[in-house]
Amino acid sequence: MNPENKNHPGHQNMFGSRCQKQVMVLTGLAFFVTSPAWSTALERNHAITFYAGRLTDGDWGEALLGQAAFVEAHLLAGSVSWVYLRSTQDAWSLEMEGNTSRYFGDQNHWELNAMTSARWLRFPWNHALISSIAFGVGPSYASEIPAVEVSIGGGSEKLLFYWQLELTGRRPSSAWELMFRLHHRSTAYGTFGEQGGSNALAMGVRFWF
């Protein structure tokens, strides 16, 4: 995605949004909910995830580095996932995920995403905070041409390429975890069209069962 116009009327400072602060507070509280009935999330292979996010006007690198501004387009997403392969010592896993997203604001439509993700699970601080980093790819289908993608990039398509980059953390005694995700759509270097794409920063919670 190559943004052409940084003067969109909905642009705001990335860290000045009340909405983003509310999401951080709510998901932070959920992170500290423990579930004694479940031993550890690493023993569970299914999960339900809910997250909220906001689109930016930059490419994925600018979004991650805080060099992009938010625009007036928000998303709410829910997904189910399944771990179909783990390494023998739980260093990594492979997962499948189905994702439904709803946009509000300057674009208002549904989006369906399906992906396969690879997750790295081994970190030296896992005795105190079990962490993971994941990267997933797959197709993304929007119920209509996304208006913000057109506004920023000059055009778009319903069917685009999807990838996500995700960080998670949870308490060892809990089946709940806090997650941060870059939610990305693009043409995959012209494979799915000439123009289109977006990058949203999102936070949410996941429950393993």
Image (spheres, rainbow, N blue to C red):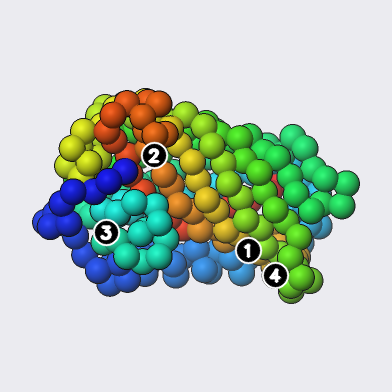
Q: Residue at x 67, y 62 (%)?
A: 131
Question: What number is the disc on residue 129?
Answer: 4
Name the quarter where the C terminus is drawn: top right
User: Circle 3 sits on which residue?
Assistant: 70
What residue is drawn where x is 26% and y is 61%? Answer: 69
- Give amino acid for label 4: Leu
Dot 1 lies on which element?
strand
Please state which amino acid type lies under the numbered disc 3.
Phe
Disc number for residue 169: 1
For the N terminus, give its image quadrant: top left
Are dots 1 and 4 in contact, CB under 8 Å? yes
| Sequence-earlier tag: 3 or 2 | 3
- The amino acid at mark 1 is Gly
Q: Closer to the observer: label 1 or label 2?
A: 2
Kindly identify which residue carries mark 2.
185
Q: Quadrant of residue 202?
A: bottom left
Of mark 1 and mark 2, the one earlier in the sequence is 1
Above or below residue 182? Residue 15 is below
Of the image marks 4 and 3, the number of the one nearer the N terminus: 3
Q: Nearer the viewer, mark 3 or mark 2?
A: 2
CA distance for labels 3 and 2: 16 Å
Report the mark closest to the observer, 4 or 2: 2
